[in-house]
Image: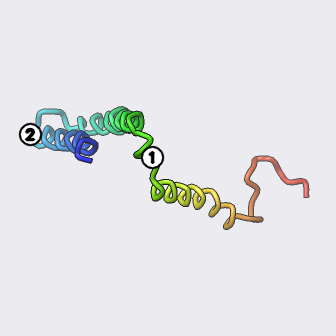
Amino acid sequence: MVNILAPIFALIALAYGSRKLGVLGPNAYLELNRFVASLALPALIFDNVAHVTEAQLNQSGFVASFGIGALAVFALPLIFARGQRAFSDRRSTD
């Protein structure tokens, strides 16, 4: 867990420290934030997913929580919006 979170918090600390010390300009935090959110974090997630073993994924709790979450995200809008509005751009011919 530390090797996953350490780079993220290190970049946050680097940005904070550089701003407090005046090393970078006043808008540098925007560019560092853009770098972290657009490049570093997706690369970190991709690297972690690429190195997951089958034993790590083959856990009933993980599979159950993912399945329940996916079902809820799919089913709840269908249940609550049923009959109120069409889900497509095409107009109904009723």
Name the residue carrying label 1: 57
Q: Which amino acid does label 1 sit on?
A: Leu
Residue 72 lies, in percent from the top left, at: 58, 61
Residue 41 lies, in percent from the top left, at: 35, 38
Q: Residue at x 15, y 40 (%)?
A: 19
Q: In this view, does 21 lie to the left or right of 72?
A: left
Q: In this view, does 36 lie to the left or right of 55?
A: left
Q: Is residue 19 left or right of residue 7?
A: left
Which picture quadrant has residue 48?
Answer: top left
Q: What residue type is labelled 2?
A: Leu
Q: Is residue 77 left or right of residue 41?
A: right
Question: Which labelled disc corresponds to residue 21?
Answer: 2
What separation in Å lies between label 1 and label 2 (alpha carbons)? Answer: 44 Å
Coloring scheme used: rainbow
User: How many labels were placed on the picture?
Assistant: 2
Residue found at the far bottom of this picture: 80
In depth, the one of 60 and 8 nearer the eye is 60
Q: Residue at x 41, y 33 (%)?
A: 50
Q: Residue at x 23, y 35 (%)?
A: 28
Q: Residue at x 40, y 35 (%)?
A: 46
Residue 52 lies, in percent from the top left, at: 40, 39
Which picture quadrant has residue 94?
Answer: bottom right
